[in-house]
Amino acid sequence: MKKISPVSRSGRFTHGPGADVARFTESVSFDWRLWRHDILGSLAHAAMLRKIGVLYRAEHGAIARGLKAIARDIEQGRFKWRPELEDVHMNIEAELTKRVPAGAKLHTARSRNDQVALDVRLWLRDEIVLLLGDIAGLQRALVSLGEKNADVLIPGYTHLQRAQPVYLAHHLLAYVEMLERDCERLWDCYSRVNICPLGSGAIAGSTLPLDRVLVAKLLGFVDISGKPQLTQNSMDAVSDRDFAVEFCAAGALLAVHLSRLAEDTILWASAEFNFIKIADAYTTGSSLMPQKKNPDIAELARGKTGRVFGNLMSLLTLLKGLPMTYNRDLQEDKERLFDTADTVRASTRLMAAMLQNIKINRAACAAAASDPALLATDLADYLVKKGMPFRRAHHVVGAVVALAEKTGKPLNKLSFAELQAVDKTFGRDALGVFNLKTAMAKRNLTGAPGTKEVAKQLARWRKQLS
Ligand code: ARG
């Protein structure tokens, strides 16, 4: 049986690669998923070759029809990928040329070096848009949960110790803010992904009069004002993977945020907190302990953060020692990039689905939030309003807390006489600060968890996300 060897070896080589070499060097087992974008790029390249007279009208028509037929075959699972043809680019080109003789002209003034840079950019552009949609979905799930439980208060924590009361919605909106920054970073990354490298050739462009602007326009490489975006240095264009690093870095930070949200969810679902109950469909059981319901989605979202960090580190390491320009090392970028995109997208979607399926245990939240110690700072503010320097007020309230502890009373159950014994500044109205409702009404600075402010923030996000 005659072995098929890659077109890149014809002419100069007498043999195809050995089987183990082929296995080691192939990338089609993973880069096949670039097929759609590879074909889009080839269609634009062919249209441009037609315009500059490299392809006759009939040849262009045949190539375009051939590429579309191949796309249909791939879509329907009828396409046979051949590892001996190395990668997605050569698989598609070889099949095209088999079907359409003019296919042999398609690679004119193109190298796989600028082709793969193009394909990855096209693919990543779509992934970023999809990921942004997933993030918006998670933001909406957080806002909805906050709205449905707009009156629920919980303790806010620092050092995982109860600190001050906050609305649950305020806590959830903190994640909405983090996710919004992730979106901003991804959009910023998008602007540098959205630059067309085709026409850079292997390293040094081409002697043929390519119309790079046409290709860029056909493929939507334009800025918001419609100006075509072209890479400006052919050497940089074929070896640049900064855009992939940027995406993996933005993905890593998104993963951090998902992981922190996961951690809060896991804590809240524990018997110790008992703030939430996750619906059965979004938990799993234990193979041994019949009573268990585990928050596995959140745990996996937290756990998968490790691989997303690893992908970023792999890419940076991959690039650091490369001499100019394209080196085959760059083939190793794809699995890392694919894995980051797949992982953060799945985690984002699953966390959103889980949040849509949790119930807030209002009684447990109310019990935790009514701990009067959470309002110790309000008592200090009370003294400040009476003219006491804050440092002194802090000290006085510390003494009040110590007294409450000693007498075994909750802070808000100390008598007027007991407060007076600590400091004469306390009036009969001092214990009024422990009314949670009025305490929450008072925190209306921008960004604070006051009743009006949180309602305002919920409304702002609802509008922004709709
Ligand atoms: N599969 C290769 C990659 O992903 C395509 C470019 C190969 N170019 C070359 N000259 N060998 O990087």
Image (tube, helix red, strand yellow):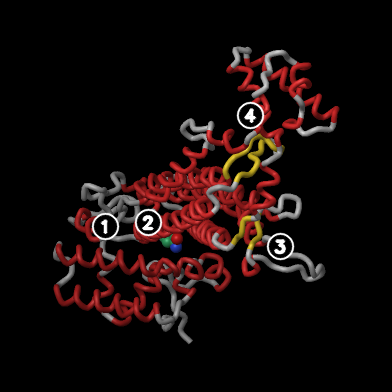
Which residue position is annotated with label 2?
125
Q: Residues within 10 Å of mark 2 (few under 14, many from 20)?
A: some
Label 3 crowd bin: few (<14), some (14–19), many (20+), radius 10 Å: some
Q: Disc 1 or 3, which lies upstream in sequence?
A: 1
Can residue 314 be seen at all in this image of the molecule? no
| Circle nearer the N terminus (1, 4) | 1
The mark lying in front, picked from 2 and 3, is: 3
User: CA gap, disc 2 to disc 4?
Assistant: 53 Å
For the point 42% across and 54% down, the residue is: 132
> Label 3 sits on what residue type?
Asn
**N-terminal-most mark, 2 or 1:** 2
> Which residue is under mark 4?
433
Q: Label 1 is placed on what type of residue? A: Gly
Please give the name of the residue rendered at 57% of the width and 43% of the height, measured from the top-left corner. 167
Q: Earlier in the sequence, mark 3 or mark 4?
A: 3
**Along the polypeptide, which appears first: circle 2 or circle 3?**
2
Q: Which residue is mark 3?
A: 294
Q: Is residue 152 above or below residue 71?
A: above
Label 1 belongs to which residue? 220
